[in-house]
Image (cartoon, grey):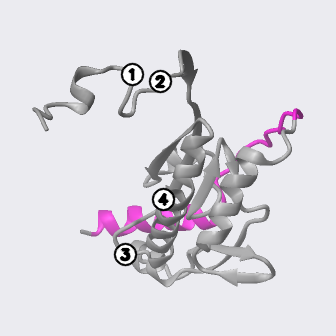
Amino acid sequence: MGNNSGCCSGNSTCCGSEKKKEQGIEQTKKKLIIDFLFLDLTVCERCQGAETNLERAVDEVSAVLNAAGYEVVVNKINVNTKELAIKHRFISSPTIRIDGSDIALEVKESVCKDCGDLCGDGNVECRVWVYEGSEYNEPPKEMIVNAILKKVYGEKKSAVQRMKKYELPENLKVFFEGQEKKNSNQ
């Protein structure tokens, strides 16, 4: 073929632009925002597994969502300070939110050796995912796929979620205090 410099040879209505013309009708893609909040991706196996399963889930549903007029945006947020935890109203690591809603209905936790080692305090607890009656240290890919599809195709609720006053959970206080102690001793 000819010169492939740039996407679609300068045609601004294709190749990832938010608007596209299809049969003379301009369509705007709806954004589906997925926030992946975590404490650590270098050591913590729970966070690493959550990231991998999230990526796989998004890969599997992207074609369907794209065909339905959705653009999936994944924000990976390393919550490495108390200030970021407060800003994002972070409850437990790792967390996956779709359009601001946590995909897990309940927060359940257990001791996380990796995060305990990371901050020097063995009492750090991280999220345990409950899916179809079983507990997992990482969110199963199927759980994420179902949460994404439910958000897009499920019943639209008009009621506004009430925001409770946020307070940094004890598990995160332990993690950040341990990190501060560990960093000040180095």
- Was residue 169 drawn as part of the magenta stretch in this picture? yes
Point out the frontmost of discs 3 and 1: 1
- Please tell me the numbered disc located at residue 169: none
> Going 60% across and 57% down the picture, which residue do you hit?
96
- Please tell me the numbered disc located at residue 20: 2
Rendering coords of residue 115 (x, y %) = 46, 75
> Going 54% across and 80% down the picture, which residue do you hit?
112
Point out the frontmost of discs 1 and 4: 1
- Asked if disc 1 and disc 2 are in contact, CB closer than 8 Å, the reply is yes
- Please provide the residue range marked out in magenta: 158-185
Point out the frontmost of discs 4 and 3: 4
- Was residue 29 drawn as part of the magenta stretch in this picture? no
Q: Dot 2 lies on which element?
A: strand
- Please tell me the numbered disc located at residue 43: 3
- Residue marked by disc 1: 13
Point out the frontmost of discs 3 and 2: 2
Q: Residues within 10 Å of mark 1 (few under 14, many from 20)?
A: some
Q: 75 or 177: which is nearer to us?
A: 75
- Give the mark nearest the N terminus, 3 or 1: 1
Three-letter code for the amino acid on which mark 1 is drawn:
Thr
Quarter residue 15 falls in: top left
Three-letter code for the amino acid on which mark 4 is drawn:
Asp
Q: CA distance from mark 1 to mark 4?
A: 23 Å
Rendering coords of residue 111 (x, y %) = 60, 82
> Going 37% across and 75% down the picture, which residue do you hit?
43
Quadrant in which the C terminus is drawn? bottom left
Q: Dot 4 lies on which element?
A: helix
- Give the mark nearest the N terminus, 1 or 2: 1
The image shows residue 40, relative to residue 30, as above or below, that is below
Q: Residues within 10 Å of mark 2 (few under 14, many from 20)?
A: some
Three-letter code for the amino acid on which mark 2 is drawn:
Lys
- Please tell me the numbered disc located at residue 59: 4
